[in-house]
Image: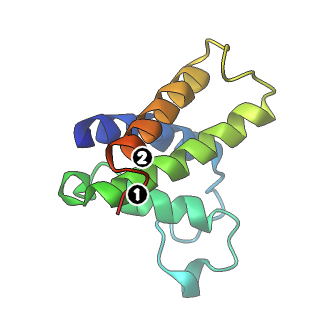
Amino acid sequence: MKEDILKALEFPRVMIRENVDLRSCRFNGQYVGELGCKLCNAATECKWLTQHDEFSSLSQKPLAEIATALEFAMHFVEALVMESDHESEVCRCEACRWLRGARETVADIHHDSNGSIE
């Protein structure tokens, strides 16, 4: 299960990097904490990227933490899909296919843990 989630996090990482405008970021998209990033519109996404990038030892993190990261990513991709006016249940684009898979994975996590991922 954990390996599936780690693999699933690859796609939203790319989507966030491609869809969050970091050109004006004085920290080059690296979340530095509330003091440096509190006025930035992309602070939440930058924090997620910093904590869940491919170099952050994700495999060492507890299942609950990476499951929460997947849920955040799912909501981000869901917003992009809705903005593009896709019907995510039937659309064949990569984002909608990923979203369907992520929903299944999240449902499996909740089912395997009796509704609690902590």
Residue 29 appearing in the image: no
- Mark 1: which amino acid? Ser
First along the sequence among labels 2 and 1 = 2
Pinpoint residue 14: horizontal percent, then vertical percent. Answer: 48, 38
| Numbered badge on residue 116 | 1
Which residue in the structure is indicated by mark 2?
110
Residue 19 appearing in the image: yes
Near-viewer residue (79 or 38): 79
- The quadrant of the image that shows the C terminus is bottom left
- The quadrant of the image that shows the N terminus is top left
Total residue callouts: 2
Residue at the image position 46 percent from the left and 38 percent from the top: 107
Q: Is residue 93 above or below residue 100?
A: above
- Mark 2: which amino acid? His
Near-viewer residue (8 or 44): 8
Residue at the image position 37 percent from the left and 57 percent from the top: 117
Q: Is residue 17 above or below residue 66?
A: above
Judging from the image, what secondary structure is the residue with disc 1 in?
loop
Whether residues under marks 2 and 1 lie with C-beta atoms below 8 angstroms apart, the answer is: yes
Residue at the image position 56 percent from the left and 45 percent from the top: 16
Pinpoint residue 2: horizontal percent, then vertical percent. Answer: 25, 43
Rendering quarter of residue 35: bottom right
Near-viewer residue (92 or 32): 92
Relative to 4, is 38 on the left or the right?
right
Rendering quarter of residue 24: bottom right
Pinpoint residue 114: horizontal percent, then vertical percent. Answer: 38, 50
Q: How is the image coloured?
A: rainbow
Residue at the image position 67 percent from the left and 13 percent from the top: 90
Pinpoint residue 45: horizontal percent, then vertical percent. Answer: 56, 58
Q: Compute the Cα span from label 2 to label 1.
A: 6 Å
